[in-house]
Amino acid sequence: MENRMNTWSTIGTNVRECKNIADVLHQSKLDYTVEAETLTTDSGLIVPNRKATTALIDGERKYFGVVSDKYQICQNADAFDFVDSISDDLTFEKAGMTQSGMVYVIGRLPEVEVLGDTIQPHVIMQNSFNGRYNLRTTICPLRIVCQNQFNFAFKHSENNVTIIHSAQMVGKLANAKRLLSGVAEYMANFNEEAERLAGIQLGMSAEQIIGKFFEQSLKGDESVKKIEKIEAQKKAILNAYNCEDNQNFKGTVWGLANAYADYTTHKSTDSSDDSKFLTVTFDPHMMNKFMEFVMDRVAA
């Protein structure tokens, strides 16, 4: 098997040696103080109801974005201070800021077993200073054997945990408890869903289902380049499906779920590393669309 990496392996700063959130922010240069500045036109007129968020970083003033004058800045140190109240079970992985302005700290929790596979829950804690991202934490299970990221949002268990900013210790403890409870609930549902899907037989070959999924949008007048792209996508998922690490799940819906997670996590793309990280980790649309298509074929 080729050497595969998750989508955050090529972004941010490695903070594995850090023991607390202050060390993480310092190591990744996220320990700055953000200010809201008055906006003016070139002629000196004040722009009403708007502020520019900026911070002094390495001696230079960095611009984050334009926000409402009612926008409440939550400094990174305040946004992530609850993390130290979680437990020693949480260790740090990466930290940084995407080009789109999402500040993130990625942590990992102890491994769990799902259908004989080792799965490590990761939590991505988010903040921003341009109004685009809320203060929250996203749960992202990682299948260790092939570094597949799963972005599942179940009916009864969301993979997002809302974080409420609080300067009081009781609030920090509540956030820590909320996160751990959310991870436990989500992973229990993840395991239950994996077992359910592993018990559903495909009814037709995986190659047929994969082919129909990518061919459903074809109109008959596609360029050679587009057809070649579709064929490459079909081949990539089928190769992932036939991998040695997926042999126990071949012929089942879970086998296809594994293959699609492998494909989305590791596929080549023209987008930046930041964009791939954001899409694969936080946008369940592609995975949900594929799984709905597979389940419709099974039901039929």
Image (cartoon, helix red, strand yellow):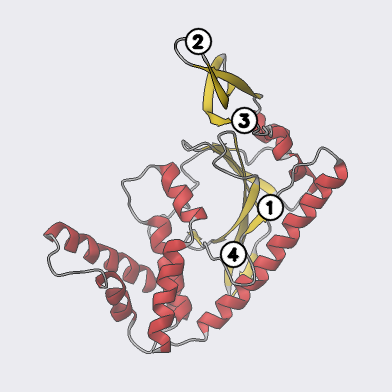
Q: Which quadrant of the structure image shows residue 299? A: bottom left
Indicate the position of residue 27 as horizontal and vertical percent values.
Answer: 63, 30
Q: Residue at x 46, y 42 (%)?
A: 10
Residue annotated with mark 3: 30
x%, y% of residue 33? 66, 24
Q: Secondary structure at mark 1?
A: strand
> To which residue does mark 4 refer?
119
Query: Which of the 4 image quadrants contains residue 81?
Result: top right
Left or right of 263: which side holds 27? right
Answer few, some or many: residues within 10 Å of disc 4's Cα (few below 14, many 20 plus, some between 14 and 19): many
Say what amino acid the circle numbered 4 marks: Ile
- Left or right: residue 234 versus residue 110 is left
Within 10 Å of disc 2 (Cα), the crowding (few <14, some 14-19, many 20+) is: few
Q: Quadrant of the N terminus?
A: bottom left
Q: CA distance from mark 1 to mark 3?
A: 21 Å
Q: For residue 127, which quarter of the picture?
A: top right
